Image (cartoon, rainbow, N blue to C red):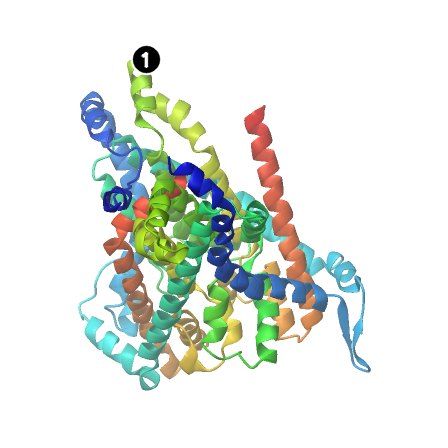
């Protein structure tokens, strides 16, 4: 009965919504849109020894696309993504399903224990794993020498990408597990009961009900992983000190942009590189979205 | 009206109540299997906790013992307290300063980001103003913009207005959390019934009054979730402070520890001793966040569960 009165006042209420979203949008524009536009603007210029900064059109971009160091870095992080993300998400999925299944003893201990590394800063995680990998006092090297074996060379060029993948996996399995677990908790339980009445066991329920229901949450995890992998910076930047001959200044695109801007003073080219990296990430994310949603439809 | 607010305050993670009835039955069906699964998960748990155990053990050792004793067990001398003392004393007590900086940057950033996200998420969820979907879609698309690609132009803009090398350079960029807004919109949709807002209007309360007086309380678990996750993001941030700050007194703990560790990497004599401080400093730096997650787990887990409904 109050509905008609409310409806009559409808539009004015709707417009006070602007008041609520305005503060967020202001900061959003100032801290996200403006820098992005500025990066795009900067990337169109070139610095010269004589004459200062001149308009260069897309020259920085054509240079970037034929820059072997940048292209090599992009392929390296793409390889990192293909190597690391499936393992990480599979572990997260298994852990989330196990904790949700009710078959696990001390489920709460597992949930919190696996999540703890997420609270460890990437800097600390990398320093710590760097010590663990080390040949001087790392426990792996100590064990190997106790067994009379040569120390594993985690920081050699062949192993480096895998060693980094391990650090990132260690940090983020728990985070993804929590997202998946939260999604599992929101599946209506009568679905399980119906399946159990039909004689389905826990494994069957996990495979036929839970995993399909997790698709949207898995997609969220996957998109975040694309973004994270392609921006890899902290791990290579810190491990560089331990293995300067393996990790050069263009090991990942972000490290390259950082070096260009702050050591090489090539600000305009660095802007083009980071803009291009953003583009690569958007394309990769949409590719992932496209591939996964297509598969689910067919 | 008050009763409406009361029920809304108790909105909980959906799907939880029926669990107990089925769980008991399930347990008896598959007790044998659970041991195998528990064992497998134990292996996983060891992988996640053993490095932290190593860090804890290492922080009780002198630099000499780090090299001469087995990494995964304590050595004879227990140097934890002297390590802690030396960590805090080194370089005129700069470590404590870094910890306080980190605490300050992350609390202000996370508080601001959670507040903006709660306000905005509520606005997007509950008001059908023109352009609602388009604006929200734009913000959501920005999740894909890599933060590191923004850091460089932000640095250049800040250096023009003299904000580089100030706390603002860290706090302002951290105030925007598109994912936080996304989470809060979903949360507000589920946790705040339209009838609550209408009841407030009938009582003559203004829109802001309704938000702060009625809605905010129901949004609390969602806000804690966004608060914690932006807190972690700022606490763990390395790239942004690395480029924005060059005054060691302004460093957060991440940049500070990285600076100390780069001094040890040079090796040799007196700097070799710094190693124990990097290890101890690392160990101490992760305690506050772990404590925060453990203490606030009830809030952030229910906040995420609601977010997962449509997430």
Q: Quadrant for residue B92, please give it.
A: bottom left
Q: Nearer the viewer, residue A237 or B221?
A: B221
Q: Nearer the viewer, residue B257 or A183?
A: A183
> Which quadrant does the C terminus of chain A fall into?
top right
The answer to whether residue A117 of the structure is visible from this angle is: no
Q: SS for tag 1?
A: loop
Image x and y of residue B4, in percent: 27, 42
Which residue is outermost to the top? A198
From what the image shows, is residue B34 above or below residue B45? Answer: above
From what the image shows, is residue B94 above or below residue A247? Answer: below
Q: Which residue is at a point 63% across and 72% down the rendered structure image?
A: A261
User: What is the tally of numbered marks visible in this picture?
Assistant: 1
Q: Nearer the viewer, residue A132 or A91?
A: A91
Which residue is outermost to the bottom? B92
From what the image shows, is residue A22 above or below residue B105? Answer: above
Image x and y of residue A19, in percent: 48, 58
Residue density around tag 1, few if under 14, some if 14–19, many if 20 or more, within 10 Å: few
> Which quadrant does the N terminus of chain A fall into?
top left
Q: Which residue is mark 1?
A: A198
């Amino acid at each position: 009965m109050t509905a008609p009165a409310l409806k009559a006042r409808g539009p004015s209420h709707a417009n006070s919504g602007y008041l609520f979203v305005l503060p967020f949008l202001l900061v959003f524009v100032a801290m996200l849109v403006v820098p992005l536009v500025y990066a795009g603007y900067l990337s169109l210029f070139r610095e010269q020894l004589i004459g200062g900064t001149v308009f260069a059109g897309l020259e920085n971009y054509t240079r970037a696309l034929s820059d072997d160091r940048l292209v090599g870095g992009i392929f390296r992080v793409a390889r990192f993504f293909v190597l690391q993300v499936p393992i990480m998400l599979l572990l997260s999925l298994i852990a989330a399903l196990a904790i949700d299944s009710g078959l696990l003893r001390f489920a709460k201990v597992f949930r919190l224990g696996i999540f703890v590394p997420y609270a460890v800063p990437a800097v600390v995680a990398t320093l710590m794993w760097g010590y663990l990998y080390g040949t001087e006092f790392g426990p792996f090297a100590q064990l190997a020498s106790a067994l009379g074996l040569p120390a594993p060379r985690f920081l050699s060029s062949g192993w480096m990408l895998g060693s980094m993948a391990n650090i990132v996996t260690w940090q983020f399995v728990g985070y993804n597990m929590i997202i998946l677990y939260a999604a599992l908790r929101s599946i209506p339980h009568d679905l399980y009961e119906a399946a159990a009445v039909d004689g389905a066991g826990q494994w069957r329920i996990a495979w036929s009900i839970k995993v399909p229901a997790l698709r949207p949450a898995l997609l969220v995890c996957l998109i975040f992983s694309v973004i994270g992998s392609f921006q890899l910076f902290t791990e290579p930047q810190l491990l560089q000190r331990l293995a300067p001959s393996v990790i050069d200044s263009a090991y990942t695109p972000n490290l390259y942009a950082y070096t260009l801007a702050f050591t090489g003073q090539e600000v305009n080219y660095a802007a083009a590189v980071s803009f291009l990296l953003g583009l690569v990430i958007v394309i990769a994310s949409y590719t992932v979205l496209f591939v996964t949603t297509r598969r689910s439809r067919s | 009206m008050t009763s409406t607010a009361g029920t809304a305050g108790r909105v909980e993670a959906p799907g939880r109540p029926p669990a107990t009835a089925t769980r008991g039955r399930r347990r008896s069906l598959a007790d044998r299997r659970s041991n195998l699964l528990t064992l497998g998960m134990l292996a996983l748990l060891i992988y996640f906790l053993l490095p932290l155990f190593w860090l804890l053990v290492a922080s009780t050792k002198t630099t000499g013992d780090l090299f001469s004793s087995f990494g995964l067990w304590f050595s004879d001398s227990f140097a934890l307290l002297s390590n802690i003392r030396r960590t805090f004393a080194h370089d005129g007590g700069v470590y404590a300063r870094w910890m306080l900086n980190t605490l300050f940057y992350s609390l202000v950033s996370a508080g601001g980001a959670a507040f903006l996200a709660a306000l905005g998420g509520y606005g997007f969820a509950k008001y059908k103003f023109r352009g609602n979907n388009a604006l929200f879609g734009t913000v959501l698309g920005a999740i894909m913009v890599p933060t590191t690609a923004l850091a460089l132009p932000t640095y250049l803009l800040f250096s023009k207005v003299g904000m580089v090398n100030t706390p603002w350079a860290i706090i302002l960029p951290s105030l925007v959390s598109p994912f936080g807004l996304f989470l809060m919109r979903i949360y507000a949709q589920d946790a705040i019934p339209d009838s609550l807002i209408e009841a407030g209007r009938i009582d003559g309360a203004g829109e802001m009054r309704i938000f702060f007086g009625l809605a905010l309380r129901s949004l609390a678990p969602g806000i804690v979730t966004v608060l914690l996750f932006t807190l972690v993001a700022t606490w763990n941030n390395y790239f942004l402070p690395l480029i924005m700050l060059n005054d060691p007194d302004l460093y957060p703990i991440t940049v500070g520890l990285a600076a100390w560790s780069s001094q040890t990497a040079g090796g040799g004599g007196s700097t070799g001793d710094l190693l124990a401080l990097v290890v101890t400093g690392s160990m101490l730096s992760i305690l506050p966040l772990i404590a925060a997650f453990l203490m606030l787990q009830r809030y952030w887990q229910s906040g995420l569960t609601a977010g997962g409904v449509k997430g």
